[in-house]
Image: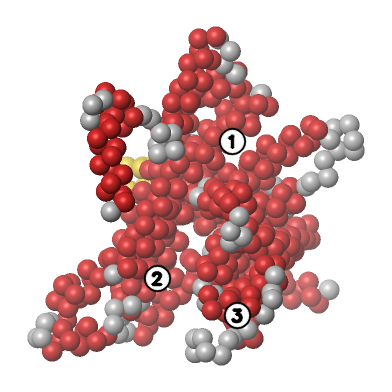
């Protein structure tokens, strides 16, 4: 009641002066749009720097190196996407095998999962880098085997082990009563799996899978240690080339910021998905 | 001498399988490898309690209910969780360490070694994960329990130490152990800044001898052993700290 009265009072007061009402409605509130406010502030600072010619030297160098850093980041993203794709495919197969009725198969997959889950990612990357040959000989052709592909293989191994566990956990989290109920409705085994179990599994697997992607993306930083030209490697080259203390500080913290900017939204989306599933 | 000849026999026995462990017969390389094993073990031994302490401190800040404490802690945890350990190590070792060295040039040099930086970075990195696990544990403490403790005159600090944390640790124990297993694996990153851990010493050996597969098997075995020990200790603790009325 009181609210309505207040609103109508404002309406009455605002009615004769539509100009001021529209001005107050479109007024920019920085608390509502923190990103816009930050962007505007950054643009203003950069504008002042350019206009007065007082841009800090380290930032000028950073701007020069930005294209190279972005190319390096693209390498990281390519590695992470490929490793995730390969690892997911292999992991689904391994996960399915770990549920097989054959005991020998279950034992073998169990060992595979244990081995690659408990091995440090860095050690696996060294493994694939130094054990795999530099080029493959297929009959007459020699296919080069660049370092970044080896890193993909090194990251795909732990990915497949974790995906297998996620898949197995998701399947086992479906109550067995659903299998029985579906059987009593005369569904065949394949149909139950395809139409009833799998859709629920996919929904359950998505948040941990996204988590895994974020963690694999962060692991791609290790590629710089085995000679792949990723963003960390580029930052090191930039730091050594420019050889200024302030630039070194800036470029390494930029690196931190770049990874955060890529991984944090994924983490937020994962949490949002988890919350949504928790409600259902 | 018999020990040496036994080792030589073992190496000779494995050789037909295609695995050449001849480096074990070289005194210098064997000692380097053993030193690497010890350094990795020391890293784990030091980093685990440091990470737990960091985790408790961050969890206390996160759940303190004071905005000026909780907000920076939340930001710190999010940044730490969502950036690669290697980049954090570079930011700490190549940047902060350099700045500290510059500052302390006149007064006796920088006391912080690469080993210490690995302990600091890995402890803080995993501490952030511990903090999240503990926060979830603290939030799972029933409100009624807290009210009862408050009505018995517990202060805010006593509440945290005597009621919330003991319960939160029990709720969070599985994920804490999981984090510690991750931590053991993560110490391999020390090789990136030439701390002489097992990975680094192995690289030194295999660049000389080209016996990558043999050494990798040993490394994997060693990390398998360490992670198994951690999970064993975790399971023992879970049994020790089990609460009646929860779980099986």
Which mark, by number, is residue B155? none
- Residue lying farthest to the top in this orientation: A52
| Residue at position x 89%, y 31% in the image | B106
Q: Does dot 2 land on a helix, a strand or a loop?
A: helix
Instruction: Please name the residue that numbered disc 2 is placed on.
Output: A165
Q: Is residue A256 visible?
A: yes
Q: Is residue A90 visible?
A: no
Instruction: Please name the residue that numbered disc 1 is placed on.
Output: A252
Q: Does dot 3 land on a helix, a strand or a loop?
A: helix
Q: Image quadrant of residue B162?
A: bottom right
- On screen, residue A236 above or below B23: above
In the rendered image, residue B148, in percent from the top left (x then y), is placed at 60, 80
Q: In whole angstroms, how far apart are the C-alphas of marks 2 and 3?
A: 41 Å
Count the numbered circles shown. Answer: 3
Q: Image quadrant of residue B178?
A: bottom right
Circle nearer the viewer, 1 or 3: 3
In the rendered image, residue A222, in percent from the top left (x then y), is placed at 53, 47
Q: Chain of mark 2?
A: A
- The lab-note entry on whether marks 2 and 3 share a chain reads no
| Residue at position x 62%, y 73% in the image | B164
Q: In whole angstroms, how far apart are the C-alphas of marks 2 and 1?
A: 35 Å
Instruction: Please name the residue that numbered disc 3 is placed on.
Output: B148
- On screen, residue A132 above or below B37: above
């Amino acid at each position: 009641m009181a609210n309505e009265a207040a609103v109508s009072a404002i309406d009455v007061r605002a009615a004769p002066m539509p100009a001021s009402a529209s001005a107050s409605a479109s007024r920019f509130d920085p608390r509502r749009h923190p990103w816009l406010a930050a962007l505007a502030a950054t643009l203003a600072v950069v504008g002042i720097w350019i206009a007065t010619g007082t841009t800090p030297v380290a930032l000028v160098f950073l701007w020069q190196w930005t294209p190279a850093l972005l190319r390096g980041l693209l390498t990281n993203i390519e590695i992470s996407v490929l490793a995730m794709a390969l690892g997911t495919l292999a992991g689904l197969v391994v996960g399915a095998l770990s549920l097989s009725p054959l005991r020998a198969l279950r034992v073998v997959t169990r060992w595979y999962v244990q081995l690659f889950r408990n091995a440090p990612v860095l050690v696996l990357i060294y493994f694939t880098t130094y054990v795999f040959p530099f080029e493959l000989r297929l009959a007459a052709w020699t296919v080069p085997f660049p370092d970044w592909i080896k890193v993909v293989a090194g990251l795909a191994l732990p990915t497949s082990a974790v995906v297998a566990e996620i898949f197995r956990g998701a399947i086992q989290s479906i109550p067995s009563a659903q299998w029985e109920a579906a059987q009593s409705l005369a569904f065949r085994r394949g149909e139950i799996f395809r139409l009833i179990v799998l859709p629920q599994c996919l929904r359950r697997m998505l948040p941990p899978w996204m988590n895994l992607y974020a963690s694999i993306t962060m692991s791609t930083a290790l590629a710089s240690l085995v000679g792949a030209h990723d963003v960390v490697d580029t930052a090191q080259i930039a730091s050594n080339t420019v050889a200024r203390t302030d630039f070194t500080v800036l470029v390494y913290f930029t690196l931190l910021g770049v990874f955060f900017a890529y991984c944090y939204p994924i983490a937020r989306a994962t949490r949002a998905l988890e919350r949504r599933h928790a409600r259902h | 001498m018999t020990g040496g000849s036994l080792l030589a026999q073992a190496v000779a026995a494995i050789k037909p399988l295609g695995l050449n462990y001849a480096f074990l017969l070289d005194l210098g390389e064997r000692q380097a490898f053993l030193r690497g094993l010890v350094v990795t073990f020391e890293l784990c031994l030091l980093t685990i309690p440091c990470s737990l302490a960091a985790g408790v401190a961050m969890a206390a800040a996160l759940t303190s209910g004071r905005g000026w404490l909780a907000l920076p802690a939340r930001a710190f945890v999010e940044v730490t969780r969502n950036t690669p350990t290697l980049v954090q190590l570079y930011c700490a070792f190549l940047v902060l360490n350099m700045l500290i060295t510059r500052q302390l040039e006149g007064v006796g040099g920088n006391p912080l070694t690469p080993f210490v930086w690995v302990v600091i970075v890995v402890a803080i990195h995993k501490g952030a994960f511990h903090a999240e696990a503990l926060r979830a544990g603290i939030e799972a403490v029933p409100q009624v329990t807290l009210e009862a403790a408050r009505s018995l005159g517990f202060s805010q600090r006593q509440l945290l130490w005597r009621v919330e944390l003991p319960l939160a640790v029990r709720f969070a124990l599985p994920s804490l152990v999981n984090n510690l297993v991750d931590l053991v694996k993560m110490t391999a990153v020390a090789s990136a800044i030439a701390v002489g851990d097992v990975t680094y010493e192995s690289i030194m050996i295999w660049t000389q001898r080209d016996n990558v597969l043999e050494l990798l098997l040993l490394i994997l075995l060693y990390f398998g052993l360490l992670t198994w020990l951690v999970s064993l200790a975790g399971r023992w603790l879970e049994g020790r700290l089990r609460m009646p009325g929860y779980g099986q």
